[in-house]
Amino acid sequence: MLPFAVRKFLYYGYQRVRTRMLGCVFCRIAAREANATILYEDDHCVAFEDAHPQAPVHFLVIPRKHIISLNAELADEEPLLGHLLQVAARIAKEKGIDRTGFRAVINTNAEAGQTVFHLHVHILGGRIMRWPPG
Ligand code: 5GP
Ligand code: ZN
């Protein structure tokens, strides 16, 4: 097996080329150019089921605007960021995981495991979560 640093370098290189060639997959989902199970949408955000769920409930909430990550310039985006969380919590409630509990995750950059460079909030629930996360 190749060392982790080499695998990481290859993986993120692949992701960059893929995004350049195909465009951003989450922008395409928001524009309905790529398929996803949409749970909710409005003028500012879209929520959809994760294609590779890591828990019985696993969905994503994204801004329609292409913001790369929490590292972006977000001074003007405070209402949008709050909106993403509010929508996420509302859907979690609709899915019945508000009382048992759920986790909101925003992976930012390589070492946190970000693979799609369009800001997204993961909501995971329906099972017991461990702490600290791996
Ligand atoms: P990240 O690793 O960037 O925090 O999370 C990206 C998430 O997007 C992953 O959980 C992955 O399963 C999900 N994902 C990647 N591509 C697609 C796609 O085309 N459709 C859907 N529905 N989810 C995707
Ligand atoms: Zn995008």
Image (cartoon, helix red, strand yellow):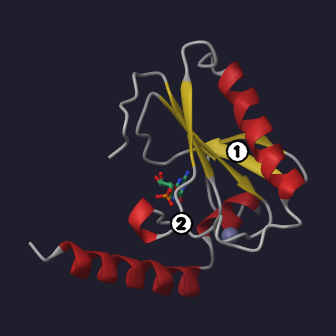
Q: How many dots with numbers? A: 2
Q: Label 2 is placed on what type of residue?
A: Val
- Residue 119 marker: none
Is disc 2 placed on a helix, strand or loop? loop
**Vertical placement of residue 131 versus 105, above or below:** above
In which quadrant of this rendering is ligand 2 seen? bottom right
Relative to 132, 125 lies left or right: right
The answer to whether any part of residue 12 appears in the image is yes
Is disc 1 placed on a helix, strand or loop? strand
* Label 2 within 8 A of ligand 1 by Cβ: yes
| Quarter occupied by residue 89 | top right
**Vertical placement of residue 116 versus 120, above or below:** below
Relative to 57, 60 lies left or right: right
Relative to 111, 82 lies left or right: right
* Label 1 within 8 A of ligand 1 by Cβ: no
| Quarter occupied by residue 101 | top right
Image location of residue 72, percent across then percent down: 70, 73
Residue that label 1 marks: 47
Of all residues shown, which one is farthest toward the top? 99
Image location of residue 130, percent across then percent down: 36, 31
Of all residues shown, which one is farthest toward the left? 1
**Vertical placement of residue 7 versus 112, above or below:** below
| Residue at 55% from the left image edge and 27% from the top image edge | 102
